[in-house]
Image: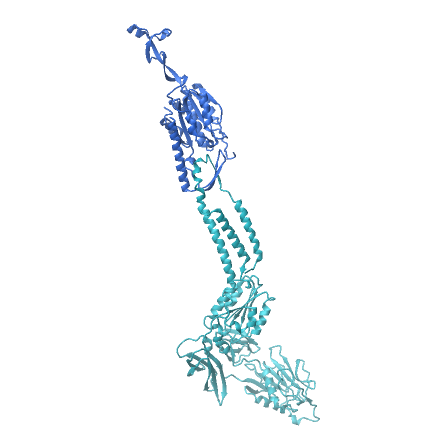
Chain colours: A blue, B cyan
Amino acid sequence: MSAVRRMQPSAVAFDAGFLRRLEQLRLNASRPTSPLGERPGSLRMPASDVVDHRPYTPGDEIRHIDWHALARHDELIVRLGRVTRGADVALVLDRSPSMAMDDQKWRLALEICAAIGWIAIVGGDRVRLFVMDQAFGETWRGPAQAPTFIDKVSRLEPGTSGSRIGPALDLVRREEGRGGLLVVISDLWLEDDLDASIASLSAPRWETHIVQILATEELEPTLTGRIALVDIESGESLEIVIDEAALTAYTSNLRQRLDHVSAACALRGASHALVGADWPLERVVMPLLRRRALLI
Amino acid sequence: MEFARPIGALALLALPLILWLHRARRKAPEHVVPSLQPWLVLVARAPKRRSVPPSVMLALRLAAAAALALALLEPRPKGAAADNDAEGLALFIDVTTSMTAGDRWPRALEAARSAIASTSAPVSLLAFGPRPRLLVLRESGPARAMSALAGLVPGGVGYNLDEIDSLMDAVMDGGADRSVIISDLPLSAAPKMAERAEWLTIGAPEDNLAIVALRAGVDAGSTMVTARIANYGDADVDLTVDLRLDDIEVADSEVSLQARSTREIDWRVERTARRAIVALRRSDGQSDALPADDIAYAVLDRPDIPVQLVGRSPAIERALGALDDVAIERAGLGTLRTPGEGGVAVFVGAMPDHPPAGGLIVVPQPGIATLGDPPSADPPLGDAAPNPLPPTLRLEGAGLHPLTRGLDLAGAMVEPITEEVERVAVSLLEAEGTPVIRTRMNPEDGTREFYLDFAPDRGDLRSRAAFPLLVAKLVAYAAPERPPLSVDAGSWVALPPWPIELAAPDERLELAGFGSDLTQSPGWYSVRSLAHDGESIDFAVNTGDALESDLAGTGSGESASLPLTLGSSKLEWWRIAMLVALLAILAESANRRMGA
C-alpha cells in the first residue's frame, strides 16, 4: 500500500568488541538436538575427557582403556566422555510493514536477530533463519559462517505483505522436526492467532522465546484530535477522536493485549520479552533476554 | 413583509453549496499506524464524542446561511420606507421658539443626528421657522449636516407651511427622496405635508405664560407702555410683571391670570425713556415652560427721519410738515450734510452733482434747470408765473406702483416740466401719457431717487387731499430702510443699503446691508452705519406670540409614526438575522472545539 515506507537496508554494524562480548554468551538450550555441536550432551561414549567409567566390552577402542584402573583393580575399564551436541536454533523474523515503519524498531529487530544468531553460530549451534513471508529457511552452522549470517541479516529488507505467523511456524515445525530453540522476533501485530500458532510448538520439544518489539509511539501514543488512523498493512482506516480519555483507553487495551500474550506464552512454556524500540541493545535488551532465560 | 434588496436572494444559492460541501467535507487528517488492533476499543466511543450530530450541525450552517441571505434581502414591514431606496434624505427641523421649551430641542437634535447617522444616502438639511433655510443640500457624508445641526440656534415666531412645501418640492428629487419633518407641531398641523413626509412630533403639551405683545405709544405728552400677557395653562396663575425703563426698574404689578386667558397691563411713563423691558415671573417661584417669552422688549423713542429741504416749494413744505416722524431741516447746496441714519434730501429746482447719501426727491421749478444749476434765492411763486400759462395735463388714474396705489389722483391737473434726465428710468405716474413722477435706483448705494416732472405749486394737485399722502409716501420710499421698532424673532429685518454693523443681544456682530434674518434671539438689536458714522438705531426682537407660546397645542402622542432612530425597524431585522448567524457560527465553533 502507499503508506508503506520503503526503507534502506539497516546495516547491522557490530564492532569487534561487542562481538567478543557476545561470544561470552550462550543460548539457553536445555535440550540440544543437533548431533554436531559443542554442547555437552547426556549421551556418554568412550572419550579422553573422562566423566565416567564402565567395564570394557569388545569393540571398545583400546586407547580408551583406563590403564591406571586396570593396574589398581585388575579389571578392564573404559574411560567414558560426554558426547557434545548442538542446538537447533530457529529464528523467525517478522519483516511485515508494521515492523519497518519505525526505523528504530526495524533496526533493533535486525540487531537482536543478528546477535542471537551470532551467539548461536559461534557457540556451535545450528541456526535457521525464517522470515515470515518466505516459504523457506536458510541454515548457518559453524563459527566461520557467523559473519555471513550477520551480513545476511543486514541485507534484509522490509517486506510488503501482511504478517501471518502461522505459515512461518508451520514451516519451522515441518523442517525442524526434532524441535529446538525457537526465537520469534516480531511486534505481534499479526493477522492470525498467536495462541494457535505457538500451540503446535510447545514444550518440551520446543523452547520458544517471543521477543516483542514495540515502538515508543505504540507504547505511548501522542496523537490528539480527530484523526483517521490507517493500518499500514491492511489499509483499513478508522476515524476517531483522540483525547486524554481515549489515550487512557488505548493504554489499558494495549496492556491487556500484552498480558494476554504473556499468559499464552506461559501456558505453552514459552517466554515473552517486551522490548522497546529505543532500548539500547547491549545494556538493556541483552540483559532482559538473559532474565527471560534466552541467554545465559 | 417586503424586501428592500431582492437581489440578495442570490445569497440563497449558498444553501445548496453548503449541502454539497457537507457531503464532501474535509476528511480528518490521516495517520498511519502499525495496526488498528489496539485502537479498535475506541470505536464504540467514537460516536459519543460528537456532542452535536452532523445533521444538527448541517442545520445550523443552513440556518446561518439563510439568516445572512435574509439580512442581505433587507426585509422590512410592507409599505415602510427605507432610506436605501431613497436617493436622499431631506431632513426638515423646526427651529421656531417653541422648540426651546423643555427638552424639545435636545431631543430634536438627537432625532436629527440619528436620522443622519442611519442613512448612507445624500442628506439635505433644512431649518424651518419664519423663513425656511436650506443648510445642506444633498451631501453624501454626514459631516456637513452634523456640523450644520450643531450651529443651529432655535428661535423664530411662526412658520410658513407653503414655503416649506415649496422648499420640499425643490429639494426632493422627483419624489424619490425620503423626507422627514422633526417638529413640535402635531401631525394635524399640516396634514397635506404629512402625506409626503414622515413626521416626528417632539415634546408634549405644556402650560406656559407669555408676554405676547408689548407696545408703546405717545399719549397726552407721555408714553403709554402696554403689555399683553397670556396664560396658556389650565390653571389660574398669580404672577408679577416688572417694567424696566433704560435698565432701571420702575414698576412691578401683581397680576392674577385665569387659565386660558389674556390680559393687558398699562404703564404711563416719561417720554424721555428710550427702552422698555417687561418681564413676568410666577409668584409661586416655579419655572416656566418657555422662558424666552417671559420677557419682552420695546423701543419707546427713535430719532425722526431727517429730511433736508433745499429750495422752496410751499406745497412740498406743507406736505412734509404734516408728517409725524420726519425732522425737516432747511439747507442750501453748500450746507448739505450727510445724515447719520440715512435721511432724505429734497431738492427743489436744483440738485448738486454729488448729492448726499440717502434718498433723493427732486422737484423742478418752472424756468429753472433742475440739474446742475444753483437754485435762485427766491424762486417765483406759482401765482406770479408769466403769461401765457403753460399747458396743463390731466393726471390719469393711480398706477399699479405702491407709491400711487390707493391715492385719488385721477383728474388732477398738473403742469408738466419735462427735462431730459438720462438717469431716470421708470415712470410711476403719468398725465395724458407724459411721465410726471419717475424713479430710479442709485447704482452706487442702492438708494432710491424720485423725480417729479411737474411743478407741485401749480395746478390743482396740491389741493387734493391725496397730495400730502403722496409726499409722505415719496419720503418713506426715498428714505433708506429703517428697521421697525419691534419685530418677531426670526423675522427678516430691512436694513440700510450701505454697510452697517448689527449688534445682537448674544454679542454677535454682523456686517451687512439691505437686511438680516439673524434675529432668532430676543432682545435689543442695534444697527450702526459704518459709512456715515451716525447714531445707532435700536429695534427690539420678541418671541412672545400665540403661535409659539401656546404650547398646549404642540407636541402630542398623535404622531409617533416615526421612531427616533430612522429605519430602526429594518435595523432590528438586520440585528436579528445577524444574531442568528452569529449563534450558528458560535455553535459550529463550539462543536469543532469539543470535537477537537
Q: Quadrant of the C terminus of chain B?
A: top left
Is residue B240 positioned above or below B29 on the image? Answer: below
**Residue B300 in picture, x, y percent from top left:** 49, 83
**Residue A48 in picture, x, y percent from top left:** 35, 11
Q: Quadrant of the N terminus of chain B?
A: bottom right
Q: Nearer the viewer, residue A240 or B119?
A: A240
Residue B300 appears anywhere in the view: no
Is residue B417 positioned above or below A218 on the image? Answer: below
Count the marks: how many? 0
**Residue B367 in picture, x, y percent from top left:** 67, 89
Examine the image and state in which quarter residue B530 appears: bottom right
Residue in the image at 39% along x and 35% along y = A256
Left or right relative to A43: residue A12 = right
Residue in the image at 38% along x and 7% along y = A59
Left or right relative to B554: residue A85 = left
Residue A100 appears anywhere in the view: yes
**Residue A60 in picture, x, y percent from top left:** 37, 8
Identity of the residue furthest to the left in this view: A72
